[in-house]
Image: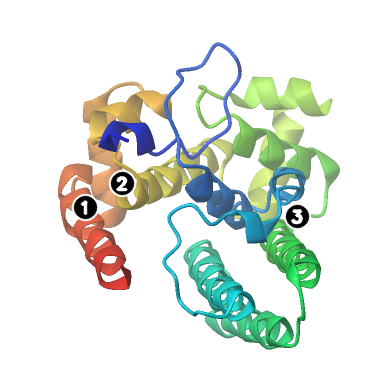
Amino acid sequence: MSKRDIVYREYVRRESDFIRAPYNPELEFYTAIRSGDIKLVNEMCKHPFTEKEEGWGKLSQDYCQHIKYHFAITMALIARYCIDGGLEVSKAYDLSDYYIQKCDLCKNDSEINALHREACLEYAQKMQELRKHKICSMPVAKSIDYISDHLHKKITVSELAEKTGVSVSHLSREFKKETGMTVSAYIQDMKLDTAKNMLVYSEFGPAEIAAILAFSDQSYFTEVFRKKYGVPPGKYKKVHFRQISLEKGRKK
């Protein structure tokens, strides 16, 4: 299997007319949890955790213990993704420890698979709550959901107002009051946060990411990325992607 056969998929869900790319299902899974996409996580958990052994190293001669070790690794990775998404460090790792300890008491595949689904959905639920904890009104909550699902498109306040059934002025006022940001600033912040993670966890370059996330052009993407993170996207990827690669290498 060539390296390009395991290219990372974009971090956002897309409509049928949007650019297609090969993807890494495992990465998409962790990203779905981080974004609080309960529906997608639930769907992906239908495939038993104990059957996802392709690429797994053998960690124990005892099959059940081998699975439990990989369960612990998965919980640690989910915790890290959620911390990166804004979950408090203590909450993320306390939840990880809780499920690892519960897994240690499991006696068979069926119990481990059920526990894996429970853990993933609880993390996704916490991430969804985190995203909406300041949100009170339905129009703003719906707008945030729509923005999250359409980062690959140019989104306007007028479009959101139409989708949520309120006036542009009303939505703009309530959005700023409840999130502390204007609609346009929030959209850009979400796109930049997604771009940052794509640079770290995927093989997409700045030009591809700028196109995928519907920035007007690469120069503008570079400008706003540098303003928020202090370095241009190319340099950010060079430093942080290398760190992730080294971490993966140490785990093999």
In front: 206, or 159?
206
Contact flag, marks 1 and 2 (Cβ < 8 Å): yes
Q: Residue at x 55, y 55 (%)?
A: 30
Dot 1 falls on a residue whose secondary structure is helix
Dot 2 falls on a residue whose secondary structure is helix
Q: Distance between the residues labelled 1 and 2?
A: 7 Å
Q: Which amino acid does label 2 sit on?
A: Leu
N-terminal-most mark, 1 or 3: 3
Q: Name the residue under label 1.
A: 236
Q: Mark 2 points at which residue?
A: 199
Q: In the rendered image, is residue 166 in sight?
A: no
Instruction: From this view, report whether residue 82 is shown above or below residue 102.
Output: above
Crowd around label 2: few <14 · some 14–19 · many ≥20 (10 Å): many
Instruction: From this view, report whether residue 161 is shown above or below residue 191.
Output: above
Percent position of residue 152, x then y? 50, 26
Colouring convention used in this rendered image of the protein: rainbow
Q: Which amino acid does label 3 sit on?
A: Ile
Percent position of residue 46, x then y? 76, 48
Q: Distance between the residues labelled 1 and 3?
A: 32 Å
Q: Which mark is residue 135?
A: 3
N-terminal-most mark, 1 or 2: 2
Q: Which of marks 1 and 3 is in front?
A: 1
Q: In which quarter of the image is the N terminus?
A: top left
